[in-house]
Amino acid sequence: MGMSTPAAKPLADDGARRSIADALFTRTQQRVLGLVFGQPERDFAISEIIELVGGGSGAIQRELRRLVESGLVKTVEVHGRTRYQANDAAPIYDELRAIVQKTIGIPEQLREALRPAADKLPLAVLYGSVAAGAATAGSDVDVLLVSDELTLEEAFALLQPAEERLSRRISPTLYSRDELERRRAKGHPFLARVLASPHVVLIGDEDDLIGPR
Amino acid sequence: MTSSALDNLVRIGKLKAEPTTQEELDGLIRSGEVRLRDAENTALALESRFDLAYNAAHALSLAALRFHGYRSENRYLVFQALPHSVGLAAEQWRVLDIAHRKRNLAEYEGEVDVDEQLLDALLRVAREVEARVRALVA
């Protein structure tokens, strides 16, 4: 630390937190990159991308064209139709893939990690700042798991590969079906908070979370 | 045991090196085991059992660290050292990690949100640490 250099003025900290993905990419870029670089082994028809990504097809097509022109995405001809795939020959292929998987592809990574135990997991929900798209570099990945068979230790072991790939701590909360029922019946604040804020159902569906109405 | 990992923690100021005595080890293990047996008492409230199990796990984990001749006032570090002090598996130490966070959160939010799955896991891990510490000092 040189004493002669003036101290850098910190940017105004108004308490606002922005997600890493939002700082780096537009929403459309996030969605397209999340799909194509989130699953780099797959190729996609343009119609599939538009369907999976959602949103305006014009914006998606412009994004895709930019990615193809830059060489980040390659086109392959299958049965005379153009399909799009992450270009593994691009100079930053590995880096971009890693960035996408760490910042955008978290739900996918979690589904993958939980898949071996999917038959024991009627419900798995991502909640908290990652689900809200407001995660900062130090944010935990919060997951609610419902299972009568899994132990918390087994949940940690299942999630460990994803934790390593994401370089983020994953914090699971594990409920039995009974416990979920009890908490739902009591309007437990934790469950109410999960329901009321953005969340991503990884396994099962929203109705399993909300319960009988 | 990989005491080189523990030595590294001493070097960066996270742990202190300090020889132990048999009395200290016996005292910590006794304290841990008494609380662990009480934590197994299903007549008690979930929150009380959680506190007892957490404190049992801490006393037993501290005994393991003291056995190797290290000390820390920081409870989290005492748990974090378990893979090195008794070779505890990552998924078991993470249960203590979660328990520690829940307990800290409770001090801010005034409510311990303990569920049975967490208590059961905490009891299993505390018993595992107990067995491993017993094997160390035997």
Image (cartoon, coloured by chain):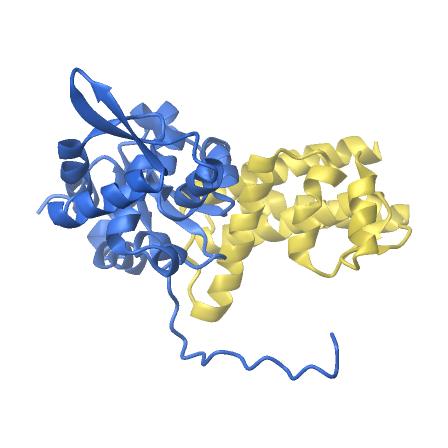
Chain colours: A blue, B yellow
Name the foreground residue: A141 vs A14. Answer: A14
Which quadrant of the rendered structure holds the C terminus of chain B? top right
Image position, residue A46 (x, y; %): 17, 33
Q: Establish if A49 lies above or below B8.
A: above
Image position, residue B115 (x, y; %): 40, 48
Residue drawn at the location 62% of the way across and 33% of the way down: B89
Residue A40 falls left or right of residue A160: left
Residue drawn at the location 29% of the way across and 60% of the way down: A189
In which quarter of the view is residue B29 placed? top right
Residue A179 falls left or right of residue B111: left
Residue drawn at the location 12% of the way across and 48% of the way down: A58
Do we see residue A134 in this rendering? yes
Name the foreground residue: A39 vs A201. Answer: A39
Which quadrant of the rendered structure holds the N terminus of chain B? top right
Do we see residue B42 in this rendering? no
Q: Establish if A153 lies above or below B65.
A: above
Residue A117 falls left or right of residue B87: left
Image position, residue B93 (x, y; %): 60, 41
Outermost residue toward the top?
A79
Name the foreground residue: B45 vs A86. Answer: A86
Name the foreground residue: B44 vs A2. Answer: A2
Outermost residue toward the left?
A213
Image position, residue A51 (x, y; %): 14, 37
* Count of numbered circles in the view: 0
Outermost residue toward the front?
A69
Residue A83 falls left or right of residue B16: left
